[in-house]
Image (cartoon, rainbow, N blue to C red):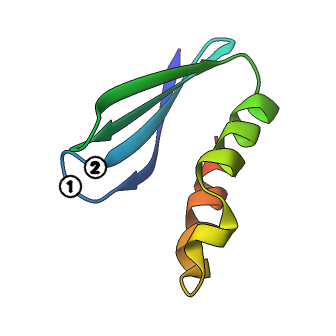
Amino acid sequence: MMKKHEIYKKDKWNMMTVEVQGRYIVLREISDDWGEEAHTFLSRPAMMHWANNRFPKEEFQGNEEEWERIMNAFKQV
């Protein structure tokens, strides 16, 4: 059984989804700058470590609520 989570979506090119496929967590990041990039994680802590490195809180100064929303979406996976 596969469960899909949407982390964020700005339009059809700038979005991030996470699929739980059995024991694997597959994250797909689609960007108009880089194209599609996929990451596979074996655990939620590994995914959260990646998310904290990918979305450092320092880059969201003045927009902390967006950072909180993204991190909460990761925690719901």
* Cβ atoms under marks 2 and 1 closer than 8 Å: yes
Tell me, yes or no, if residue 76 can be seen here.
no
Q: Quadrant of residue 37?
A: top left
Q: Is residue 64 left or right of residue 13?
A: right
As drawn, the residue found furthest toward the bottom would be 62
Tell me the residue that label 2 is attached to: 14
User: Is residue 70 in view from this perspective?
Assistant: yes
Q: Residue 23 placed where, x, y %?
A: 69, 12
Q: Is the C terminus in the top left, top right, bottom left or bottom right quadrant? A: top right
58 sits left or right of 2 in the view: right
**Residue depicted at x 33% and y 47%:** 15
Q: Residue at label 1? A: 11
What's the residue type where badge 1 is placed?
Asp
Q: Secondary structure at mark 2?
A: loop
Q: Is residue 10 left or right of residue 25?
A: left
Residue 76, image x, y percentages: 66, 48
Q: Residue at x 18, y 47 (%)?
A: 12
